[in-house]
Amino acid sequence: LGAVGLSRETVTALQEMKDRGLLLNKVTYGAVVNACAYGKDMAAARRVMEEMRSSGVMPDAVEYSNLLHGYKRLNATEECLACFDEMLFYGVKPSTRTYDGVLGALAAAERWQVFRMYLDRMQKEGVRLSAITYGWAVRGAERAQDWGEVLSLFRALQADHYHPTASTCHAALKASLALNDLDTAVAAMTTLLREGWTMGRTVYATLQLRLLVGGDLGTLRKLMLEAEKEMPSTAAAAP
């Protein structure tokens, strides 16, 4: 029941367990909190969390992650931030998933300055960024036209062995052309070609021209061969 978000049924099952005098442990309470949060019944999730705590079973990052993601689904950004602060107040150490909850809410609300504050905190604490967090961070940096940050995040994403998405590659390509970082531009372009993702012919032609002017004919030939292999029409259309 908990895994599919049947909050009402899960709360009823919890009450039946209590009526029978069965022992309720962290797994039991956690499943109910998850069901309520997944079903967007945050009031019920909160009540179960309080009951859990009052019974001597302390919520940890798992339960708080479920709450945070529940608030994120409802676009309840302020509640999400308050929940994160509450988690810290009780001494619960944030995890990748808890940060994903609060950062996802901030990204959806396009509150990029606050997003940056939480991202900085996450990195200082040494919490591993997820692939989706990198995607949100790149989008925020792109909106701010902070091209250096876009490239820094793109390289960090690759260093963490995540596969970049189409939007991340497009942002990295835009940033690398703005900063004349042709090596990164070629890497982003090659990924786009190999994945068969949409790529603007103007951007492709711009990169070709930069390589030609820079005298990097070897890289230019490799790029053209890759384009011909993966997207013949694009290669043929380029000057």
Image (cartoon, rainbow, N blue to C red):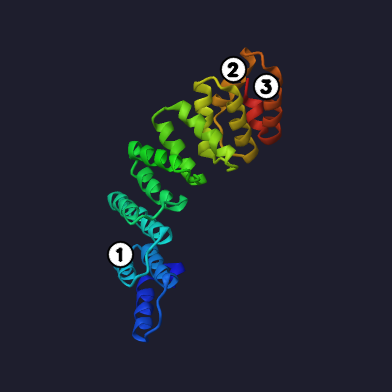
Q: Nearer the viewer, residue 31 or 170?
A: 31
Relative horizontal placement of residue 161, taking residue 88 as reference (left or right): right
- Residue 111 in percent (x, y) is at 33, 40
Which residue type does callout 3 highlight?
Leu
Residue 11, placed above or below residue 235: below
On the rendered image, what quadrant is the C terminus found in? top right
Residue farthest along the bottom direction in this orientation? 20
Q: For the point 58% across and 43% down, which residue is it?
A: 162
Q: Is residue 27 among the parts visible in the rendering? A: yes
Q: CA distance from mark 3 to mark 2?
A: 9 Å
Q: For the point 40% across and 41% down, which residue is it?
A: 121
On the rendered image, what quadrant is the N terminus found in? bottom left
- Residue 14 in percent (x, y) is at 37, 77
Q: SS of the residue at dot 2?
A: helix
Q: For the point 42% across and 73% down, which residue is it?
A: 25
Marks 1 and 2 close (CB-CB < 8 Å):
no
Residue 46, label in figure: 1
Q: Which residue is mark 2?
A: 210
Q: Quarter-wise, where is residue 61 in the image?
A: bottom left
Is disc 1 surrounded by few (<14), some (14 to 19) or many (20+) residues within 10 Å?
Answer: some
- Residue 90 in percent (x, y) is at 33, 57
Q: Quarter-wise, where is residue 62 in the image?
A: bottom left
Q: Which residue is mark 3?
A: 220
